[in-house]
Amino acid sequence: MMTNFEFPTINYDVVIVGGGISGLTLACGLRSSGLLILVVEAQQEQQVTKRARAYALSPMTSKIFRDLGLWEQIAPKISHFSRVLLSDADYPHRVEFCPKDLGEAAVYYCGEHGVLMAALQQRVATAANITCCYETQVVEVRYGVQAAEVVLEGSQGQQRLQTKLVVAADGINSQIRQQASIKTNGWAYWQSCITAFVAPERWHQNIGYERFWTSGPFAILPLPDNRCQIVWIAPHAEAQAIVALPRDQFMTELQQRYGDQMGKLTLLSQPLVFPARLMQSRSYCQPRLVLLGDAAHCCHPVGGQGLNMGIRDAAALAQVLQTAQQHRQDLGSLVVLKRYDRWRRYENWVILAFTDLLNRSFSNQWLPMVKLRRLVLRLIIYWSFPRRLLLRLMTGLWGRQPQLNALSAEKVPNGNDSVKHIASDHSSSAALQKIKMN
């Protein structure tokens, strides 16, 4: 039952709406900043962690996690791609990307959602300046000249907060973005994405595959314990029909796309399906508000760019905010937030355009396009310069790179006085009132 009792206003420097990977990466990036951070998540803590999904992680993402002191915990629990093979349907020539093309330890990595979330949640839980409120909704945000007022609601009632900056990290259908009337550009694709975990009969050798069919791309992401995640793109009606098939028929269809290079497949999870779309916000910020990750943009699943873009967003925003804090600038001012907007919105547009071009170029049977794309493939195979250039674009090693070493180098209090996670059914309002402004 909602209470009408008016709680005193509590002040924060940054309120992050959304406790997913992007939101918690930002929180970790600000762990040493001296700023008082609140992370608000509508779901239970366990719900946020439990998601049957794995992600292709770029070398730039691994660098960011290293800078944040997370990589030692994550690396042993994920796979390190020894190669990535890219091909066009049954065309015999294929592009092979190797670590030497980048000068990195691996071409790509693949990690499960739960592994990444566990590392991020553990890191945030030990930070004295960060509080996480789960099972808590943002009812209203009012943006003022000096601060934003945020009204939260949990099972114990409402809590009113003031903050210098609100960060919308609440996903592609961001309520914070919509309530602020920030417009978006983009479109829904004619395709849906099917994901599932499988176990091949033979060892996958840590090789990733991306094969383009006229119906859409098909990717194989190797995971530890000789498991793989498949990412299968198909037109909407075809995708729905595929996931509705009996298990044995589904596996027959999957095996045809997968190939026999790893032997017989065993299905480990229920296939999931979701529509593919492209979206880019017209602005990533307004006074007292900034958009992060899927709240700011969304791209086609081809190439596994989406999560990596969000993690780079978080690292860039952490750098911008910490620099502003060091220069005693207002965190919520447009002067500060436009630095992030100019940095990330342009670079994200390039990736969005690249994934769109890649999908449209390969998902058709127009003969001139077929000949052109196969000519390009052969050029990439035999000439290392365009191959390395393409790989740097795909792996996040082009453009301006976040520098978070200074953030992670500073020692952070790790004692028992740190603020722990607060669930709404444990009197979060009362607990929040104990936090004082630095």
Image (cartoon, rainbow, N blue to C red):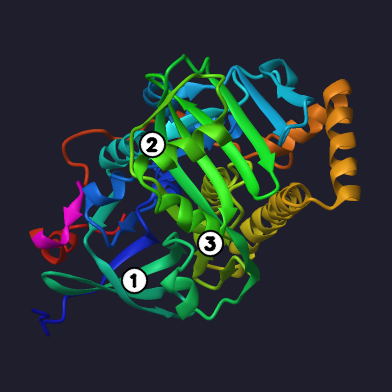
Label 1: how many residues lie within 10 Å, few (<14), some (14-19) or many (20+)? many
Task: Write down the residue under mark 2.
Answer: 116
Identify the amino acid type marked 3: Ala
Q: Position of residue 142 (x, y in %)?
A: 40, 81
Q: Is residue 140 left or right of residue 87?
A: left
How far is disc 3 from disc 1 in space, using C-alphas? Answer: 47 Å
The x and y percentages for residue 191 are 59, 58
Which residue is the site of mark 3?
A: 237
Label 2 is placed on what type of residue?
Leu
Label 3 SS: helix
Determine which quarter of the picture holds residue 160: bottom left
Q: Residue at x 15, y 66 (%)?
A: 429
Vertical order, 145 against 17 (above or below): below
Location of residue 405 with respect to 288 vertically, above or below: above
138, 107: nearer the viewer: 107
Magenta residues, start to end = 420-425
Residue 412 seen anywhere in this rendered image of the structure: yes
Q: Residue at x 11, y 82 (%)?
A: 5
Residue tagged 1: 162
The quarter of the picture where the N terminus appears is bottom left
Q: Nearer the viewer, residue 81 or 417?
A: 81
Residue 65 in the image: above or below residue 77: below
Q: CA distance from mark 2 to mark 1?
A: 30 Å
Residue at x-position 64% and y-position 60%: 341
Between 291 and 91, the residue placed more toward the observer is 91
| Residue 405 in view (yes/no) | no
